[in-house]
Image: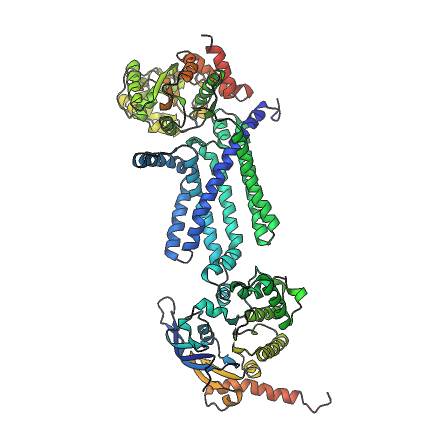
Amino acid sequence: MPETPMIAYVDVVKSFDGGNGAERVLAVDDVSLEVAGGEFLAIVGGSGSGKTTLLRLANRLIDADQGTITVEGCDVRKADPVELRRRIGYVFQSGALFPHLSVAGNIGITPKLLGTPQAEIADRVDELLELVRLDRAQHRDRLPQELSGGQRQRVGVARALAARPRIVLMDEPFGALDPLTRDALGDDYRALHRKLGLTTVMITHDMTEAILLADRIAVMRSGRLLAQGTPAELTQSKDAYVMELLRTPRRQAERLSTLLPRDGTA
Amino acid sequence: MSLFTDPRWAEALTHLPDYLGNHVRVSITALALGLAISFPLAIAVRNHPLSRGILLGLASIVQTVPGLALLALFYPLLLALASLTLSWFGVGFSAFGFLPAVLALALYSMLPVLRNTITGLNGVDPALLEAAQGVGMTAQQSLFSVELPLALPVIMAGIRTAAVWVIGTATLSTPIGQTSLGNYIFAGLQTQNWVFVLFGCFASAVLALAVDQLLALIENGIRGRSRLRATLGGAGIAALVAATLVPALARPPSNYIVGAKTFTEQYVLSALIAERLRSDGLTASSREGLGSNVIFDALASNDIDVYIDYSGTLWANQFHHTDIKPREELLAELKTTLATQSITLFGELGFENAYALVMPRARAEQLGIHSIADLAARAGTMTIAGDYEFFSRPEWAGVQKAYGLAFRAQRQMQPDFMYAAVASGEVDVIAGYTSDGLIKKYDLVVLDDPKHAIPPYDAILLLAPKRAGDERLQAALKPLLGKIDIATMREANLRASGNDSSSSPDAVARWLWERVGKR
């Protein structure tokens, strides 16, 4: 591949203390993975598969035991972790908005840390509210607890995008939302990803969501990377677990197409 | 006369600017110091279980020390420190009053602040800590813009608890020489002036509530991001401090400070001395309710100028003599010993306030007891009561040894209550004071001490080292020497133990001067 990958994991290992003298738990077991610029990668796996650990290694919320991780060609170990995190957007599970800050305060936090002038931050907040399709007059000064789950996650996305990152990491961003909101938000984000030329890594346990949103999917189980590729490539996989993961969306698609025939009278 | 028209309310009110002002200053300073120490400490140890445990453990131990003891312990500690700095750096400081009170109270305020700050910070949702890291905050930015704001309600609750504790406990700083609202309470308890006791309790409760509410206002302001409310609360505290400083600054500083221990006679005599000084055109103020061990050191280090002690007390307690000498000899030797510390034994007032074993006259006659020697045979079936210090004083050991006294039980009591206790038969004998007016009131009898096991206790005027050559002071005090006989002092003490407006120490001091001034 001639182009440098945006994010690259090479032989990465990470283990955690099992606690109370138990054996160390291997969360990420010798994983190598590349994410190209502009790509939307979904990492799919059950709980405890190591997918969140893999994501957090990229912006050094945790550090790897072995192996190398590069972001935009640079070894993250040589980067200042704070500076690194400021240039990578991160959307947390169920938002993790700061409850004592208003919507505007939450969205503007990273630019503020970067020393951006107040007026410029205010303009940027308005721009972002529009981008994530929230009415600025109505939401700007509200506190997170006054928002619905979907609105909160939209603010979470806006916060991740505030400092104009090229990379966005998302940790099960739409997991806790109702199906309709989830669908709308997924579509909206996908559009933003394309419009802004982002590189996105999203974690999900939902294969259907991954297939619908991502360019490529990586499947993880017990810390190991089982397969990666486009949805079409994944169907060629001989791995039992990957096949099982694909069975659900496939069965759903078949049932839906019989239940909702396109050539009907509707 | 109803409770509300009692003139003692008005008298209490005249002391309020002084007592309240001092109380506010010592409490707020202690609280600020306590906060300045415990807040950074709590932040530093919050993620280190071992040091966190040690720190909280130490703070809890401090909390279990009774407030009065903690305050009292700081006095000798600082006194030793002051003499060290004086010999090393040539700079001493006053270990009396403000400093020990502030240090002890600051220590007292630490536990709630430490515990609540640590609990508050550790209670912040880990997901938010990760979010703070994830958006690119440094550890310090995360602490100040996420963790502390979120822990604020718990932290403020701790600060408010500490404030209420400190303001309440500050009433106990009176015995170590810090004027406070406790002056009302200590003086009121000693002279049975319940109006004063109530007034002191009420004033400190109102102060505690006011400070608590101002802190709540600040907390509310910070939490609701209302600069107005936070400023109002802060201004309220500042105004409180300023209001207590103004009268203190406006009042001319008194040149002479008269000390008094914690019993009725001392309140009366210090009022008498202060009045004598004022009538001679000198300015004087009193420092009342001082602990027995504090007052002598305070005089020796020039923190107070004059007070009255008793020869036997100094002899046995201060200078640790175990032998008893005849009256004149003891006084002469005491004078020389005091002179080595540059303290002037100016003279005797004319009466003795000795410890004595006292019992109801009727009972003594019935049992044929005239002296302590007669008592010894029956002591095994009897109970004795004494004040808080008597049973640990060397005189008691001396009496026990001389007569082979062994009582069935010993009880410690508030001095004013023990006379009533012996009169009612609740105890059989008490270690009373010969000058106490209650001896006459309850028809009690003082038992003879044929073996002279109890030293003489002449009331003597002591002057601080810096007053050794002060002629105006000495001229003002001279008329008191040798004028007050035991009968007069007993009557004065009896008057002061009454519970009406003519029983205030000032009123009794005026009565006393009218009786003895013309002699």
> Residue A159, image x and y in percent?
56, 68
Q: Please name whichever residue, B468 or B389, is drawn nearer the observer in this view of the structure.
A: B468
Q: Residue furthest top?
A: B519
Q: Residue at x 55, y 46 (%)?
A: B215
> Residue B276, image x and y in percent?
47, 16
**Left or right, A130 with reference to B434:** right
Is residue B77 shown above or below B320? below
> Residue A129, image x and y in percent?
63, 69
Q: How many numbered marks does the figure carry?
A: 0
Q: Please name whichever residue, A234 or B327, is drawn nearer the observer in this view of the structure.
A: A234
Q: Residue furthest right?
A: A265
**Which quarter shows the N terminus of chain B?**
top right
> Residue A164, image x and y in percent?
55, 72
**Which quarter shows the C terminus of chain B?**
top left
Q: Does residue A99 appear anywhere in the picture? A: yes
Residue B104 figure quarter: top left
Is residue B516 shown above or below B113? above
Is residue B204 shown above or below B456? below
Q: Please name whichever residue, A83 or B474, is drawn nearer the observer in this view of the structure.
A: A83
**Left or right, B400 with reference to A11:** left
Q: Please name whichever residue, B379 or B355, is drawn nearer the observer in this view of the structure.
A: B355
Q: Does residue A103 appear anywhere in the picture? A: no
